[in-house]
């Protein structure tokens, strides 16, 4: 009996589960390491697997698959070897642009620590992935409100991932 391959769904689930399990402790470690208790680094309040969310509480993490490639020479009869390109980003807010800039750098550091060179697997599903962070991009700072009442500042940090996906669907 043949099973359908898990591919990007399992890859995304493994990455999100790892972030959820480790983000609070890693953010706390980054904050202690920087010895600056003024800038907060609270764990994410929302997680999304699509990039079009309009209403959410910050910090919010997005884990979005961009593409999947199957190198022809490495796809065998009894296994799947694929490369998944995906983005993990966090949207954060703060009342101060200075604090927001530091906070964005700390979230980037924590996510990099969790994901770069990570090896994750789901043994019952016969899936193993290797994660590498290719690059990190920081959005400009913008405000939620316009006019005299500026409101909170908002910024996004995005990590581009290359994920090597190995799966034996038998």
Image (cartoon, helix red, strand yellow):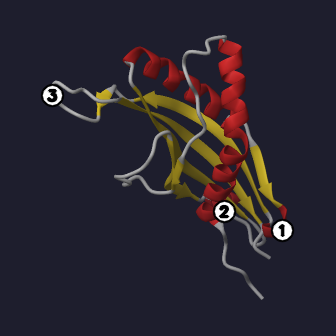
Dot 1 alpha-carbon crowd within 10 angstroms: few under 14, some 14 to 19, many 20 or more: few
Q: Quadrant of the N terminus?
A: bottom right
Image location of residue 78, percent across then percent down: 78, 71
Tag 1–tag 3 contact (CB < 8 Å): no
For marks 1 and 3 on the same chain, the one whose residue lies earlier in the sequence: 1
Q: Mark 1 sits on what residue?
A: 124
How far, Cα to Cα, is label 1 from label 3? 55 Å
Nearest the viewer among 83 and 112 is 112
The image position of residue 22, as x and y in percent, is 72, 40
Name the residue at 61% across, 12% down: 36
When asked about the image quadrant of residue 81, the answer is bottom right
In the image, is residue 113 above or below residue 51? above
Which quadrant of the view contains residue 107?
top right
Mark 2 or 3, nearer chain start: 2
Count of marks overlaid on the render: 3
Gap in angstroms between the C-alphas marked 1 and 2: 12 Å
Find numbered disc 1 in the image and state the secondary structure of the residue it sits on: helix
Residue 27, position as x, y percentages in the image = 66, 29
Q: Which comes before the other along the chain, label 1 or label 2?
A: 2
> Would you name the residue on which mark 2 appears?
10
- Vertical arrangement, residue 61 with respect to residue 5, above or below: above
Q: Is residue 8 above or below residue 131?
A: below
Mark 3 nearby-residue class (10 Å; few <14, some 14–19, many ≥20): few
């Amino acid at each position: 009996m043949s099973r359908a391959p898990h591919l990007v769904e399992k890859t995304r689930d493994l990455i999100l589960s790892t972030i959820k399990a480790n983000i609070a402790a890693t953010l706390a470690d980054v904050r202690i390491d920087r010895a600056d208790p003024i800038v907060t680094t609270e764990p994410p309040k929302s997680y999304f697997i699509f990039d079009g969310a309009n209403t959410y509480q910050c910090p919010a993490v997005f884990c979005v698959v961009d593409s999947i490639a199957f190198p022809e020479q490495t796809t065998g009869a009894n296994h799947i070897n694929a490369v998944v390109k995906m983005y993990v980003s966090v949207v954060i807010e703060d009342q101060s642009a200075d604090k927001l800039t530091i906070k964005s750098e700390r979230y980037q550091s924590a996510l990099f620590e969790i994901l770069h060179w990570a090896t994750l697997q789901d043994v019952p599903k016969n899936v193993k992935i290797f994660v590498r962070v290719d690059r990190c991009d920081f959005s400009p700072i913008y405000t939620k409100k316009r006019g005299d009442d500026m409101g909170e500042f908002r910024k996004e940090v995005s990590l581009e991932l290359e994920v090597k996906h190995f799966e034996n669907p038998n």
